[in-house]
Amino acid sequence: MMMTRNERWLNALNESNASSRELQVHALAHLGFLDLAISRARAHPEEIKYRDKHGRSVLHHVLRKNPSLSNLQDLLDMYPEAIDQQDSFDRSPVDIAICYGANSDVVEYMESKQKMYQHRIDDDVADLQALRLTPLMTGKLTTENEAIRLS
C-alpha cells in the first residue's frame, strides 16, 4: 500500500531528531492533523509555546485548517496567551481565522477570547501603574504625608 505525501511526512517527523521535535505540534496542525496536534500538545505542553520561523503559533496553524470549535477551545484552554500573538506578518489568530474562512462560531469565539484577554492585560497594566503612583501623584495626601512633605 502506497503512503500519501502527508503520511510519509508524518513518519519522517516521528523519526526526526530532538532539535526539530519542538515544532511537531506545529507540523501536525499545518498538515491538518488537528486531533493529533491537540493530543501532542497535551502530552508535551512546552511545545505549544514555540513559534515557527514566521512567528506563527500553533493556533495560527490550526486556524488555517478550519478547526472545530471544540479543538479551538481545547487549544486555548492549554495556552490562552496564543490568542494575542501576531506572526511576523502582523497577523493575529483572528486575522487568520477570517482569512481562511473559519465558520462564524469560531470567529465569534476567537473575537470574544481576544477581547477578554486584552481586557485582562489592560487591567494588569492599570494595576501596575497604580502601584507606582505616589500619594502626591494621586492627590491623596494624608496628614502624615503632608507632615513629611512640609518638614
Image (spheres, rainbow, N blue to C red):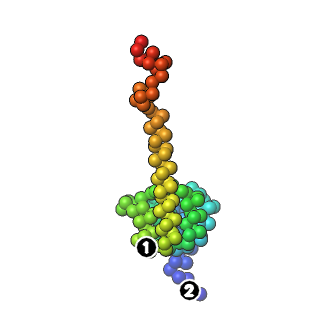
Which numbered tag is attached to residue 2?
2
- Badge 2: how crowded within 10 Å, few (<14), some, or many (20+)? few
Q: Position of residue 63 (x, y in %)?
A: 48, 69
Residue 137 % position (x, y): 40, 29
Q: Residue at x 49, y 45 (%)?
A: 123
Badge 1: few (under 14), some or many (20 or more) residues near its Cα, within 10 Å?
few
- Tag 1 residue: 100
Query: In the picture, residue 68 is in which quadrant?
Result: bottom right
Q: Is residue 76 above or below residue 138?
A: below
Viewer-closest of 67 and 144: 144
Q: State the residue at coordinates (49%, 18%).
A: 144
Determine the secondary structure under disc 1. loop
Viewer-proximal residue among 44 and 60: 60
Which residue is depicted at the point 43% across and 67% down? 96
Residue 54 visible to the viewer: no
**Can residue 86 be seen in the rendering of this structure?**
yes
User: Tag 2: residue type?
Assistant: Met
Towards the viewer: 17 or 53:
53
